[in-house]
Every structure is written in structure tokens, then in C-alpha cells.
Image (cartoon, rainbow, N blue to C red):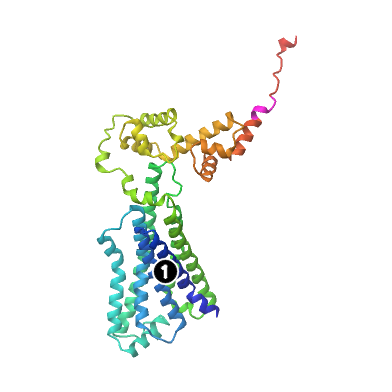
Amino acid sequence: MLFNILTILPMLVCGLITMWLLMIQWRYRRRERSWLIAWGVATTMLYACHAEYFSRPDVANPYTDTIYAVCNLAVYPLYLLYIITLVRGRCPRRGIIALLLGPAVIGGVVQGILYGMMDSAGAREFNLIFLRNDSMEPLHGVSRLLALWHVACRIIFAIEVVGVVFAGQYLIRHYDEDIAMNYADTEGRLLTSVRTILWILLGISVMSVVANIIGRHWFSDSTWLLMIPSLAFSLLLSLIGWEGIMYGLAPTSGETLATSESLALNADEAQLADGTVPTPVVAEHIRQTLREKKLFLRHDLRLSDLTEVMHTNRTYLWQALKESNTTFSDLINTLRIEYAAELIRKQPETSISNIYVLSGYSSRNSFYRNFHDIMHCTPREYAARYYLTITSPQPSPQPSPRERE
């Protein structure tokens, strides 16, 4: 009973997530969610083939094995296409789609052709010798070619895993850097959760690669061995689906998706900077303007807002901040926290709940997190330390020897 539940658990989890995504997509259409739904469909079919493999060990089914080959080589590229669309705000070019999904298509076509060249007796022999025992010695002819093709697909799968994880991390890191350089308030815009999922995906993918190398048959004889990948993949599928659902419903996500490519400087704009003004001077002018006009108190301030106030182009500001090893978001947060600390000192009657609003924050959690990162304590701890310092009795000065006389 437990064995049967474990075989179908990842399929059920992914199927439910895919249905949920489809219902959300029906009401709120988003480009990137289409790729996530395609990923969900492929993953559900993949684990359906897994379930069929474990539940019917004596049955040779060329159709499910071919579908498994296609889906196994498609799930990771589909997730990368989801990330590409997420960070760029538009679907990838056809060439990129063909490059990423080509191995899955070719793998399925070649495997289908090889199965088509075999009779039912040959398919049963292949199932018993290779799929169930991972041996190629007695195989010959088309059966041996099919076994070698399975091994080639496993190698391609391993390459895909590494490539997708690191390509996804690269895209998300640059996307988050662009967001931090253009927005003062980054909450709800950064793809931190996707980066975390990718690292988890890398760890669990090592298990996938190992499972593909040693063969699925190793897990068919032990419920406890099967429990490890079943629960791990079910949890990962839940995280991916939940992240896709929640990010798609975030109030700021649609805005950033549509503008992510416009965040970075283009070549024409970059040529506007002639380098005549030293970077430290520009950086200090930025800080001075923000302080004098108290622009950092604006909710959802953007770098483009500052360029309009300073009557300059974005290139100067972008490069000055970048060469100063800071981001627009970090600079605004520093000024806001300094202002909040000043309010705590000068207006002790003002509550912390009001101070974070007066300091330009719309989120209490962001205020507390940034205050602790910059001041290395909570707002209440800061207030307690400050008032303890100014109310502590100061030691009276000791008279000099001449005064004693």
C-alpha cells in the first residue's frame, strides 16, 4: 500500500499544482505562467510514466517509455524558459526554444523509431534485460542501439541539469541587480525565492542524475529507497508550484516583468557619459540631492525619478552608483534608516509604527530588516540604548590639586 502511494505521490502533487496554475491563468493571463504550466504538464506525465513503471514491472510499454524520455529531457529546459520569460517580460526567441527543447524532441523521435523497429518479443526482452536490470550484455541489434540511446539520454539529462541551474542563477542574479539599481523598494520584485529553489533543484537533481545512472530498477524492490526520491521530489514540486502561484499574484510582479529589459542601460545611452565628472563627485551629488529634497521619503522611488529632479541622464547616476559599489536601493535604505534613527532620537513620543511610515517605508518587515542590517540592532533596542546613554548620570569632574588647596 505504502509503495503504491509513493509511486503516484509526485504525479498527484504536480497534477494538482498544474490544475491550480491553469485556473489562475484562466483569470490572469501571464506569459511566463504558460511555460510553468507546460513544465507542470510534462512533469505530471513524467511521474505518470514513473508510476506505470513501478506498478507494472512485468509489462513492456514502448509508449510510456518514449513519453518518459521526452518529458525527462523537457522538464528542466521548460523551467529555464519560464525563468527567461520571467526576467525578460517576453517569450524567448524561437531559436532558443528550439535549442532547449530540441534534445527532448530528438530523444523521443529516435526512441520511438527504435521501438518501432522491434517486435513485441524484442520489447519484452529489452524491458526485462535493460529497463529492469540495467544490463546490455545479452542485447544485440536494435535492442542494443536502444539501450545505448537510453544511456546517451541520461548523459544529456545530466548536462541539462547543470546548464539550467547555472543559467537560471545567472539570469536571476542580473535581474535582481537591475531591480536594486532602479527601484528603492525591491520587496515583491526580487526573484529570491526562485534562486533558492534553483539551489534546492541542483541538490535534488544530483539525486536525479544518480537515479538515472544507476537505473530506476534499484528503487522498485525497496519501499524505503523509493520513499527518499518520492518525498524529495514531491516537496520540490510543491515549492516550485507555490512560488509560481504566489509570484504571479504579487502586486508588483507584473510591472517588473514588463520592464526588466528596459532597466539596464542600452548602448546609445551608455555613450552619453563622457567621463568628465569624477564618479565620487557624482555619487556625492546624488546623496546631497536626496537629502536636500528628501526624495528618499517617497514611496516606491525610482532611479528615473531622480534623473528628472537632477536634470541628467540615467547613465551618470547608474555608473556612479555602480562604481561606488552600491545600488540605488541600498543608498535609499541607508538614508531612510538614518532618518528613522534621527526621528527616534528627536521624537521619543512617536511610535515605531509611525516612524517606519514617516521614513518612507510601506512595509514594516522591510523597515525592521533594513534597520537591523544597517544599525545592527532593532529600532526598540536603538531607542533604549540612546535614552539610556542620555539619562545615565555623568561622573562629576574631579578637582585638580590646585583647586583642592
Q: Residue furthest right?
A: 405
Q: Is residue 322 visible?
A: no
Residue 170 lies in magenta, yes or no? no
Task: Say left or right for 200 vs 352.
Answer: left
Where does label 1 land, which residue?
Answer: 209
* The C terminus: image quadrant: top right
* The N terminus: image quadrant: bottom right
Residue 390 lies in magenta, yes or no? yes
User: What's the magenta region?
Assistant: 389-393
189 or 279, which is in the foreground?
A: 189
Task: Say left or right for 113 vs 6.
Answer: left
Residue at 55%, 36% (x, y): give it: 355
Q: How dense is the environment of label 1, judged by Cα within 10 Å: few (below 14), some, or many (20 and up)?
A: some
- Percent from the top left, x then y, of residue 299? 45, 39
Look at label 1 and name its amino acid: Val
Local secondary structure at mark 1: helix
- Percent from the top left, x then y, of residue 302? 39, 40
Q: Residue furthest front?
A: 27
